[in-house]
Amino acid sequence: MKVDKSRQLFEEAKRLMPGGVSSPVRAFRAVGGQPLFIERAQGSRVVDVDGNQFVDYVCSWGPLILGHAPASIVQALKVAVERGTSYGASTELEITLAKMVAEAYPSIEMVRFVSSGTEATMSAIRLARAYTGVEKIVKFDGCYHGHGDSVLVKAGSGVLTLGAPDSPGVLNAAAQNTISIPYNDLKAAAEVFDLHRTEIAALVVEPVAGNMGVIPPKPGFLAALRKLCDENDALLIFDEVITGFRVALGGAQQLYNVKPDLTCLGKIIGGGLPVGAYGGRRDVMEMVAPIGPVYQAGTLSGNPLAMTAGIEMLRALRQPGVYEQLEARSQRLAEGLSRAAAEANVPVFMTRVGSMMTTFFTEEHVVDYCSAKTSDTGSYAEFFQSMLDNGVYLAPSQFEAAFVSLAHTEEDIDLTVDAARKAFGTIAKNESAR
Ligand SMILES: *Cc1c(COP(=O)(O)O)cnc(C)c1O
């Protein structure tokens, strides 16, 4: 595979930007490789600056559930851009998108649009603290809720991948009010509430963990968290930045039938443009400025281009059969990958909820951060590189999800499984040579 131009651009980028990137995981450090610079993308495929084409399962880290550059969103954006890119004033587009969100999420009576998932979680946590009048937050090890100070404690995604503990620069006071416990561990959750009964403002959780690789909640886990919060007057915040519109139109709260007080959305809701949102119970949301005292604002919040892309995205996802197709394609991929690993005698643990999945290179059952960390990241790096060489672009880290989109065809899936057969074969061969 020719990578001359990517290599050259990366050298230049590194002089100008930390690590040569605008977001850490893009630098391929966890797989020891050379990041590819992308020139364009369409449907299930991305093309890099050296002309290599890949079936893409990163899908911009989650947002692109329709695939790249879907005609409906591109067309709508062309019309919208001619009308001006930003006004800093209200538009009907915000009402349209807010209605669509409320229809899909009965728990969201009021919503505030922001520009990223980080902003959504930061704001929801501030709001929960203001509403309850207490300061402690409970989260789970390996869950990622953006890079706000309060949640950069035992976080997932790039923090986990780079092995960085809590980031320097985060206020001790912020970190001290955050308690992080193992995912899927109800006993730990109950103990925390016993210990800090009156001090907990909110429990924030990825209802399906997606930032330490995909880890589904154990049966009853989310409902038990709901009960704990109710018994202790804490708010339950579902961070559905990945799972929202992904595992079902109504997110994980629909799939598992558990109603949070507040929900954070991002990624898919922006149709590939920067949108985040937080919303929930009316009595809580009415504390947000300007009708309440909790300040939160944004120059580009509710941006007309971003709202337009979000509306078109949700329109497409409201069509019948969409989630059934995603499920069928995703199942085909997961089963194909499992079979390919078994044939090559490479031990893996596959996890999947709908169109998000992870192939963990471990023999353990992955249920939390600790078990996820038993994965052999060296084998993942080999797998990643071999897949790339065979035309498949996976996340450059073991601890991320692969996302299937509506643009992935059965042929794409079969090509991917063929590539995986070769990749697992290479790993098995290297393993026996060691
Ligand atoms: C991606 C992500 C975020 C942060 O969203 P950004 O748009 O990257 O700021 C927050 N929570 C979860 C669960 C995420 O996956």
Image: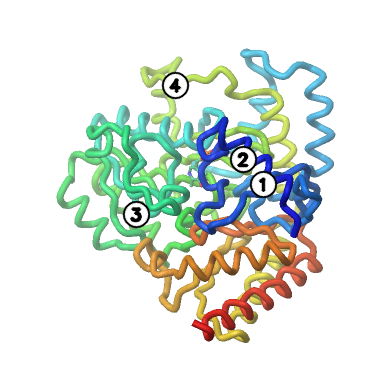
As measured in the structure, the alpha-carbon distance from the residue carrying label 1 to the one carrying label 3 is 35 Å
Which residue occupies 56% across, 43% down? Answer: 105
- Left or right of residue 233, residue 69 in this image: right
Say which element carries label 1. Answer: helix
As measured in the structure, the alpha-carbon distance from the residue carrying label 2 to the one carrying label 1 is 6 Å
Say which element carries label 4. Answer: loop
Q: Position of residue 210 (x, y in %)?
A: 50, 55
Q: Earlier in the sequence, mark 4 or mark 2?
A: 2
Residue denoted by label 2: 11
Is disc 1 surrounded by few (<14), some (14 to 19) or many (20+) residues within 10 Å?
Answer: some
Residue denoted by label 1: 7
Residue 390 appears in the picture as rendered? yes
- Left or right of residue 418, residue 115 in this image: left
Q: On screen, 402 above or below 10?
A: below
Is disc 4 surrounded by few (<14), some (14 to 19) or many (20+) residues within 10 Å?
Answer: some
Of residues 320 and 82, the one nearer the viewer is 82
Q: Position of residue 73 (x, y in %)?
A: 78, 37
Residue 321 appears in the picture as rendered? no
What residue type is disc 1 on?
A: Arg
What residue type is disc 4 on?
A: Gln
Q: On screen, 168 above or below 214?
A: above
Q: Quadrant of the N terminus?
A: bottom right
